Image (spheres, grey):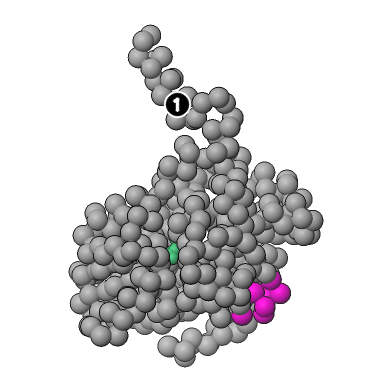
Amino acid sequence: AHQWRGVVREYADRLPVDESTRIITLGEGGTPLVHAPALSELVGGEVWLKVEGMNPTGSFKDRGMTMAITAAVRDGAKAVVCASTGNTSASAAAYATQAGLTCAVLVPAGKIAMGKLSQAVAHGAEIIQIDGNFDGCLDVARKLAENYPVFLVNSVNPSRIEGQKTGAFEVVDYLGDAPDYHLLPVGNAGNITAYWKGYQEYAQSWTNPHTEQELEPMATQTPIMWGFQAAGAAPIVAGHPITEPDTVATAIRIGNPASWEQAEAARDTSGGVIEPVTDEEILHAHRWLSAKEGVFVEPASASGVAGLIKKHAAGEVPEGKQFVITVTGHGLKDPDWAINNPEIASEGDSSAEAAAVTKVDQDVET
Ligand code: F0G
């Protein structure tokens, strides 16, 4: 029987690998593109969710990490390092483990979800908590990689972008062409950079610079890219770095994205936008996904959906179009928000948690 072989093997002809490459993989990618009936009805179009929580460590980071750790091994690295709001560290720790590499992760103290921290601990990473935010962690990680023999696996490493561009390939392979619009959260801006690169490469004849193999176009169009930042952490929207970014969506609590210019290029070349969504809008979209589409994500992952709902309310979503929204990470990464979501609390006079506990008490009595 055939099973999905991970993004590097599935898309080897479009990545910097050849037959001699030792590939480090946990079988990432091949994630479901799920039709979203309630969102489709709302906007009068066809809305699909690329459910990246279905990756081995529960986020889209695995697509980039298989390629980055494969590159680290090829370069003879013994140790890797990254800065992270949580998901990159979880992914780096897992892939480094398979490769037999030491992994150090720098995370903002107290601002990373417990599920993600648990993963880094479980995989034996060296965890360095830093007072400050992601941007400070990335500065330290970059300096470590400059001054010590450690390999940086943040998305400033081109291998990460190469791996992550496969998300766009999968969308086109499934739909038969690129959608009219692609929506996604923007934090450090690696993913919008990667999707745009993938869509562009698929829409033209393209020569793999590593193997010099020539490849035919797979799509007739590229989508309009709509990126969304949390309003309290929206440097690209503001046009300047934010020194104290803040949002409930800790994954995208970033004030100075590394791929800033590439994100602007994706926005401008595609004729798209990068706009803010408030925490309230993010949590509303999080609730919408759980309650109406059956898809459980972490708060940051709902930003693209929040953006679609917001732009629809503003009359800015044309009817009859095809939309793909990347929902970036699994709800189990940061499950508190399901119970503490203000919308659930306001549905009754007690919180959902209290309601669930009451139910258990009754069951015990009978
Ligand atoms: N969604 C989730 C769940 C994320 O973890 C991230 C980034 C993003 C969206 C934004 O993607 O940075 O490519 O624009 N998380 C990084 C991390 C920063 O360290 O895990 P981006």
Residue at 25% over, 62% down: 127
Q: Front-most of 33 and 344? A: 344
Q: Which residue is mark 1?
A: 354
The residue located at (41%, 24%) in the rendering is 357
Compared with residue 218, is residue 117 higher up or lower down, i.e. above or below? Answer: above
182 up-or-down from 22: above or below: above
Q: Residue at x 45, y 30 (%)?
A: 353
- Assign the magenta stretch its main secondary structure: helix
The residue that appears at 20% across and 70% down in the rendered structure is 102
Q: Single out the residue that lies furthest toward the top.
A: 366
Q: Is residue 347 above or below residue 173?
A: above
Q: Is residue 42 left or right of residue 172?
A: right
Query: Would residue 170 be seen by someone viewing this image from the given angle?
Result: no
Give the image location of residue 75, x and y in percent: 27, 84
Q: Is residue 124 visible?
A: yes
Name the image quarter holding residue 133. bottom left
Between 325 and 351, the one lying in front of the other is: 351
Is 270 in the magenta? Answer: yes
Residues in magenta, as a range: 265-272
Three-letter amino acid code at the position of disc 1: Ala
